[in-house]
Amino acid sequence: MANNDVCSHKMAGFFDSKIRKIFQNPEKIVGPYIDKRMTVLDLGCGPGFFTIEMAKLVGSNGEVVGADLQKEMLSKVKNKIQGTDLEDIIQLHNTKKDSIGLSKKFDFILVFYMLHEVPNQNKTLKELYDLLNDQGKILIVEPKGHVSKKDFEKSIELMKQYFNVFNGPKVFYSHSVILEKKEFS
């Protein structure tokens, strides 16, 4: 089920193109879930395609953490925001291969095209549960080209251990779900 092959930073240009915005407009995809002053995590942020747009949505009193396994991707984000107001909104975090490694709580978490890359989805989902505020939401989007419907359904079964799972927004050539924390007594 898990691919474990992390998409190389050498593909950053492909993931950050103006053409991609036509098919996967960040504001349309994440805008309905993000308000001013929120604390947001972009897990597997890559070159910041969603990170920067999310920072604009949370505004100067919000915070976005762009987290990625590859330091090269984080450097691309850092270079884009250097000298702008976004530097005060966006924090960058280098994850480990087997751990997100954050402890703060988030109002919204985006996991775009990367869940299939983690070595242990169950462990990652548990960690996401711990990072999410009680009223928060997680948007998980996976590419149909890499993740079959059957494999996505297996991932959803893992998600259901921790989260209530709802249909996500329509995203070009993708599977998507919205997660909300289950209450455990």
Image (cartoon, rainbow, N blue to C red):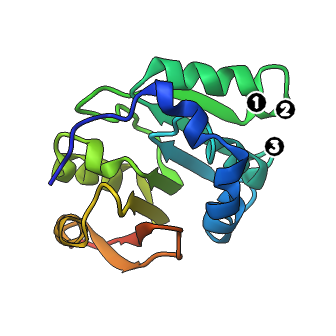
Q: Nearer the viewer, residue 26 or 185?
A: 26
Q: Is residue 10 above or below residue 105?
A: above
Give residue 56's mark. none
Q: Which residue is mark 1?
A: 88
**Residue 122 horizontal/vertical position (percent):** 17, 53
Q: Which residue is mark 3?
A: 60
- Circles 3 and 1: CB distance less than 8 Å? yes
Q: Which residue is mark 2?
A: 85
Q: Is residue 52 above or below residue 9?
A: below
**Residue 80 horizontal/vertical position (percent):** 73, 26
Dot 2 amino acid type = Asp
Q: Secondary structure at mark 2?
A: helix
The extreme bottom residue here reads 167
Q: Secondary structure at mark 3?
A: loop
Q: Nearer the viewer, residue 145 or 60?
A: 145
Any part of residue 107 in sight = yes
- Circles 3 and 2: CB distance less than 8 Å? yes
Residue drawn 51% across the image and 51% down it: 106
Dot 1 amino acid type = Asp
Q: Secondary structure at mark 1?
A: helix
C-alpha separation, residue under disc 3 versus residue under disc 1: 7 Å
In the rendered view, does 145 fall on the left or right side of 112? left
In the rendered view, does 13 fall on the left or right side of 132? right
Q: Give the quadrant of residue 63.
A: top right
Q: How many marks?
A: 3
Circle nearer the N terminus (3, 1): 3
**Residue 1 horizontal/vertical position (percent):** 14, 54
**Residue 97 horizontal/vertical position (percent):** 26, 28
C-alpha separation, residue under disc 2 versus residue under disc 1: 6 Å
C-alpha separation, residue under disc 3 versus residue under disc 2: 8 Å
- Circles 2 and 1: CB distance less than 8 Å? yes
